[in-house]
Amino acid sequence: MSDEIKPDELLNKIDYGPRSDKGPGNWMDTSVQIRPGMYCYAAKAESVETLGLPNARPWNPLEEDWKLPENWQEILHQGMKERLEKFRTFKVFMDICVRCGACADKCHFFLGTGDPKNMPVLRAELLRSVYRNDFSTAAKILSKVPGGKALAGARPMTMDVLKEWWYYFFQCTECRRCSVFCPYGIDTAEITIMGRELLNLLGLNIDWIATPVSNCFKTGNHLGIQPHAFKDMIDFFVEDIEEVTGVNVEPQLNKKGADILFITPSGDVFADPGTYTCQGYMILFKYLKDKYGLDVTWSTYASEGGNFGFFTSHETMKRLNAKMFAEAKRLGVKWILGGECGHMWRVINQYMDTMNGPADFLEEPVNPITGTKFENSKSTKMVHITEFTADLIKHGKLELDKSRNSNRTLTFHDSCNPARGMGLLDEPRYVIQNCCDHFYEMPPNTIRELTFCCGSGAGLNAGENIELRMAGGLPRANAVKHVHEKYGVNSLATICAIDRAALPTLMDYWVPGVDVIGVHELVGNALILPGEKKRTQDLRFEPLPGFEEEDDE
Amino acid sequence: MKLKQAVKKNKELFIKKWFQATINTYPAQSAKFLGKDANRFDNPVGATTHETIEDVINLVLDDFNQETLEKALDPVIRIRAVQSFSASEAVSFVFALKKIGEDILDDSLIREFDTLVDQIALASFNKLMKCKEEIFLLKATESKRRIHSAFERAGLVAELKEEDLLGSKKS
């Protein structure tokens, strides 16, 4: 008997998960190393306080003591229990993973960082190992059998485990590429969402999320810009557009009784190069107003389409989202049109209706110019602007001069949420191809449903974690580099505000010479406004093709 | 000359072993995936590492200088510069060549080969520093480029101009 291997020894030899190269032992025993460049700063106490979220205090992830309440384990256990009862998906996802590994090498963070704990299966396992320890009956029974503990993969919630949760749940952009490959359809984004929600019960948010959320709650947008400054920026765009086109495109703000309310991420109003996309919307609305009498209003209250509450907790997401319907009701519009944004559309398309609906005071959206019923928005009453513009183009309602964008050779980056979260794949491509002549797709395994994330979504577009962002964005940049070298692509078009903010830096590092541009900036350049002067410059005040010399003089 | 001939003769073996040694600087479970001969868009780290190693070997068989060596090393160092390796870990893969050389080459060539590896190592240090500097510069100018410049154009703020900050990149 004595020279035979005991069952638990045998089981301990099974290689069922990544091992550390620092020596023997399995991944669950390796404590986390929080590395500068890979993590975001801790949430400021005052930002956590604004929303009345728990445990607001200054803390530093690099310090030993995270200043947690004494009963933090109990809080987490209770929090997990409540959520397992409340969210059926969470419970199912905790139970059904068979660790087949199909998702393992599909994550941009794993592919870019080479850190095995960024394999989606392992990121989920961080939570699942505690679930097995605390909640799973099967795992509890199994752990009583010799060797069963290793097989069950259960571990108790310790400070090391908590730190690991925090480090890795903020190394996931909730892009859902992994879920496309999961034979069970497990949505790892939802696991990250739950992980972050649990961390927030202990006040463990990051500041790049907490402060925008606090700003948004107080002033209506993530940057905390007040209504008068919002108006100042719009006025400034009006002046710039007039200089380029000779037409005053002044939009309507907070107009009661308008037909359509337009909401876009604040990044379009305040951050380059989104500001040029914003000018594209303004040119489009002016064109539609003059030609067809379309009555669109902007709002200084609903001045944010994005929703960083989504990266905090369901409750916070709901609170920030509420202003969209509230403002639509106050202004008495028929339906809502939404700008180019990423996660904003996952919130609208998948949660808004159940969170803050039904919006029975709004009409089912119909394009008043073409008569098209927007079936996809029947319930939410909110239409994506590329669907709207594509419909106008399809019906020949826009006069576009493609040659004004002919200095650009484009490719299109599918933003994760519109692509995987709402199936918006062809509309932006249709708009792009009607606004310019030179368009090339990136390789098929990097676009559409299989698109690679920018690496900076879900609140991770901070400065301090730039190495993580550059590593996470590598698979995307690698595909851009390919079309840049093969077809001379010099412009990366996108329909997401975070992309517009994050991708220029990513391109600077990996593929210098590629510019980032919003789809409606292309529209703004190509659209021939009634009564416009001869245009010689684009919206960035760069000479239009054919006018380069004139500009030099 | 003798050395180049010997390396040339064993080129495929050098590439294979050096690639494996480089991939083995990642944790074992990651190395399994990164070492796979997958589509270059499904496995950018593996594919880029392989191509770079091939390019560097080809280059040292030909005429090269510090500049061309740094250029050839760029793709792989650029990746390792953002992968939470320490500086020494990031360039450690170059030193793996010494052991590979010892296993493959005749003893009489080792001294010369080690000198060659030293040259590659020095070029790697240079490249790593340049990548790190690029990252710091991007970090320093990014938020200004994003938000400040829009406000600046709108005349809502007046401070240092964007060019003042970016100037250091051009100089």
Image (cartoon, helix red, strand yellow):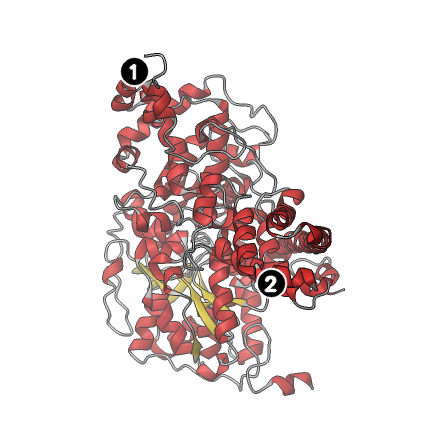
Which quadrant of the rendered structure holds the C terminus of chain A? bottom right
Seen from this angle, which residue lies furthest top? A2
Task: In the rendered view, tell whether residue A466 sits above or below residue A524.
Answer: above
Mark 2, Cα crowd under 10 Å, few <14 / some 14-19 / many 20+, is: some
Which quadrant of the rendered structure holds the N terminus of chain A? top left
Question: Would you say A141 lies left or right of A30 here?
Answer: left
Identity of the residue drawn at 40% across and 43% down: A310
Instruction: Check residue A46 in the rendering and tell me which mark sits there, or answer none.
Output: none
- The residue labelled by disc 2 is B8
Question: Would you say A212 lies left or right of B166 here?
Answer: left
**In x, y percent, where is residue A30?**
50, 28
Name the one closer to the observer, A285 or A525. A525
Residue B149 in sight in this render: no
In three-dimensional space, the C-alpha distance between marks 1 and 2, rounded to whole angstroms, equals 60 Å
Identify which amino acid the numbered label 2 is placed on: Lys
Task: In the rendered view, tell whether residue B125 sits above or below residue A159.
Answer: below
**In x, y percent, where is residue A52?**
47, 31
Quarter-wise, where is residue A440 in the image?
Answer: bottom left
Identify which amino acid the numbered label 1 is placed on: Lys
Query: Which element carries disc 2, helix, strand or loop?
Result: helix
> Disc 2 sits on a residue from what chain?
B
- The residue labelled by disc 1 is A144
> Disc 1 sits on a residue from what chain?
A
Name the one closer to the observer, A243 or A277. A277
Identity of the residue drawn at 60% across and 75% down: A541
Q: Residues at marks 1 and 2, common chain?
A: no
Identity of the residue drawn at 52% across and 31% down: A32
